[in-house]
Amino acid sequence: MVRFWLAPRHKRWTLARTGAAVFPLGILLAAACAPSPAPQQPLPPQAPAPAAAPRGPQKGGELRVGATTKATSLNAYRDAGAGSNTVLTGPVYDNLITFNYRPDVDWRKDLNDLAPQLASKWVQKDPLTFDFTIQEGVKWSDGTPFTAADVVWSYNYWREPKNAFTRASLIAGADKIEAPDARTVRFTLKAPAFTFLPNLAEQYAGIFPKHIGETGADFEKLEQLVGTGPFKVVSWDRDTRAQLVRNETYWDAGKPYVDKITVLFGMDQSARLAAFVAKEIDVHYVTDEKTYQTVKTQLPDIEGEVNIGNTHVHIYINNGKKPFDDVRVRKALHLAVDRATLNKVVSGGKGQINPPLVWGGTVYAIPQEELLKRPGYRADKTQDLADAKRLLSEAGFPSGLKAVVKTSSELVSTPPVQQAFVEQMKKIGVELEDRQTDRASFTKEFNAKEYELSTWIFSSPDPDQPLSTRLHSKSTSNVSNVEDSRLDEMIAAQREAQTTDQRKKVLRDLQEYLEEKVYLIPTIDYASWSMRQGYLQSWVDNRGVDPFMNASQIFWLDQAKMPKR
Amino acid sequence: MRQYIITRLSLLIPVLFFVSVLVFALARVIPGDAAILKAMGSPEGDAAGEIIGELRRQFGLDKPYPVQYVEWLGKVLQGDMSTSFWTQKPVLEEIVSRLDVTFELAIGTTIVSVLIAIPAGVISAIRRDTGLDYVARITSILGLAMPNFWIGTLMIVLPAFWWGYVPPPGYTPMAQDPWRNFQQFIFPSLAMGTSFSAIAMRMTRSQMLEVLRQDYIRTAFAKGLRERVVVYRHALRNAVIPVMTIVGIQFGHLLGRTVIMETVFALPGLGTMTLRAIQQRDYPLIQGSVLVMALMFLLVNFVVDILYAVVDPRIRYQ
């Protein structure tokens, strides 16, 4: 009936017309795909070149980073859950004192290694009194002089409940904060606190401007973002990007080196990886070694290494709920966790096995070689599994039990651990339902203690905060439902210790006590592979998965090696 | 026609009212709220209970639900969609700032979809049971079968590893830099367009096959008309009306379904904003954006209905 449509003349016409319609699109697409930087090809072997003279920091250039999450607010201190906010505020607000950040050094290993920032020096006059001397000549980025009154106002502003500062607990130990003169700030503590100084060095302990705050500012608006730090934010869109430029009034002469920083939000993992490979961003983190090796092959000049991250994954137990109020049940679960396999499955064996609530990388943790020989942590699980079954049987569950384990599906780190945990518990007859919800639902249920088991993290390198908030009977965040006066005393004792050795001893006893009581089950820390372009120098890695710029004043860009953007 | 338009437009009001009640209720059924998330969302979650209470008071979450609803609806009727819990910005301002991205992506997707679907559908029909027909049909099935987020991810990752190219990160408005904007939108439009074209292509093909069997087509050829004229003036114009319906409905759906591509390509559209609002329990933003999406969907369907009469003079609305 329509045979004549098959005539060759018609076929040519149709194809030509169709092609004409689609061709411009193809040309534009091909043009869009034109490589901007030169293709990355491995170089042929060459004779070694004479060693280049070491070059000092250069000024100029734009650093680009991609944040894992979107920024939700310019006031990072009011939004506890959004790490990306500190990518913006970290370079804007300086602290009184800071951790001694150095390139290629894991700053978390010695949290007592502190350096001056807005305070040039400090002295502990007695166990309860600290005097800080403010640096001379420091100005806010709007030109207003910085004084001790700013520090006093700032910390009192934090402590005011109506300001809803979620990190106010960092200075909860301070009784009085005063400024005896324009260059001195005096803290009087309620009780001795070993953690007082490290808390002041935390990334959430920046000093806010009194003259802005007194206008009623909530520090959520761009024009209210006035700091003493090396950069100032000049534009931001919480879904796409923020731009920071050098603060020309910065007190540390000659710094920072980089002209501007662009933070890109909202790119997913694959988009960030692609952007790093195309040298559109300068820093990236991956959580599997294979991807890291692939990128390293593609871009041999990048710098990178494996490091243990900031997400210490634990199985939280609701100790007030049956059958988990029975230590034998809790201990059985602890013994049945095959941590070596867990580490291999979720982190390629490069992660770290942790003791309870003390990060394994610190001086306070039970040493790894010792930990890995202990029941529950050792690689050979034969005896552990037999003991676990016996304990369950003694507790009245000879054929196992059923429970629900919850976590947030929005986190990268907890769902894989939870899945592996659920599988491993089957070996002792414990059938767990793996329930994953979004973060808001999980947070609500977790904090209301509406759970039996939950997989969650802590990220503080110092053990004081997780111990005080999660296990102290008087804490409003005691989600584990622990009522143990001896543990409360031990938590107080580690905080009030006067020397590192004293604290190490208390924390050692505390870890062994927690091992005996099993109020929660420690698992592993993820390994991540950080990568940065070869032209980015003096970068201080956060050891996490976000490019927190802890020391934004010291990194610099070797512009001769940078691609044109 | 005027009466029809007035009737259709007046029906929007009860529908939007129903949507407002539904979205208000659904937003509050899901567990958790912005105050607890803001205060306790961190790993240590150490905010004191009084901070959560203060945040709830600031957000108005301490009031009974009916009071919250009436206050919100009252504001909406006065053109104020309230303020975001997280950004402290007016919700309407937030929505308007995202609309252009979503519209551009939806329009780009529709253009790609139509550019693929119509020629492929026509060729497939007039070359029925030939190699070209099989290729077109298999391609359309593949387009349906492959998830567009996967195509999108490949479009980002492969050029990066092969040629060191990625679409410029972030979003640049067209008015600021059209070329950069084009590079940012062409890939998500292609990824979505290939998938959306599949249904329209199959519809075009089946409609064309049906029309080509009609007597008037035979008559047109018998009169000695050139085949180009017969295909495009007589056959395609009649076959395209159901395709228009499909494309129109798809466009309406696209306004609320671009979220995945917006996420993959980091485009700040209405979809990602709404998703984030849901994750953060930002009630005013959830309610405002769903209301606007519902309104847009209704308007697009309305416009498609009106366009029938433009394309086919036989259609008249009473």
Image (cartoon, rainbow, N blue to C red):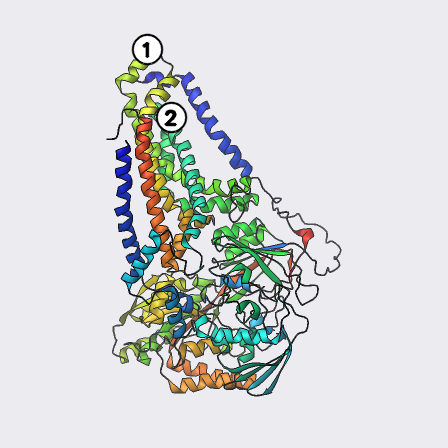
State the residue in front, A40 or B299. B299
At x 44%, y 79%, the residue is: A468
Q: Which one is closest to the eye, mark 2 or mark 1?
A: 1
Q: Quadrant of residue A388?
A: bottom left
Chain at numbered mark 2: B
Chain at numbered mark 1: B
Sequence-earlier tag: 2 or 1: 2
State the residue in front, B72 or A92. B72
Q: What amino acid is labelled 1 in the image? A: Lys
Can you tell which mark lies on residue A343? none
Q: List the residue tagged with mark 1.
A: B223
Q: Report whether residue B10 is seen.
A: yes
Q: Is B308 above or below relative to B95?
A: above
Q: Report whether residue A424 is seen.
A: no
The spot of residue A157 in percent (x, y) is 50, 73
The spot of residue B138 in percent (x, y) is 36, 34
Can you tell which mark lies on residue B123? 2
Residue lying farthest to the bottom in this orientation = A126
Q: What amino acid is labelled 2 in the image? A: Ile
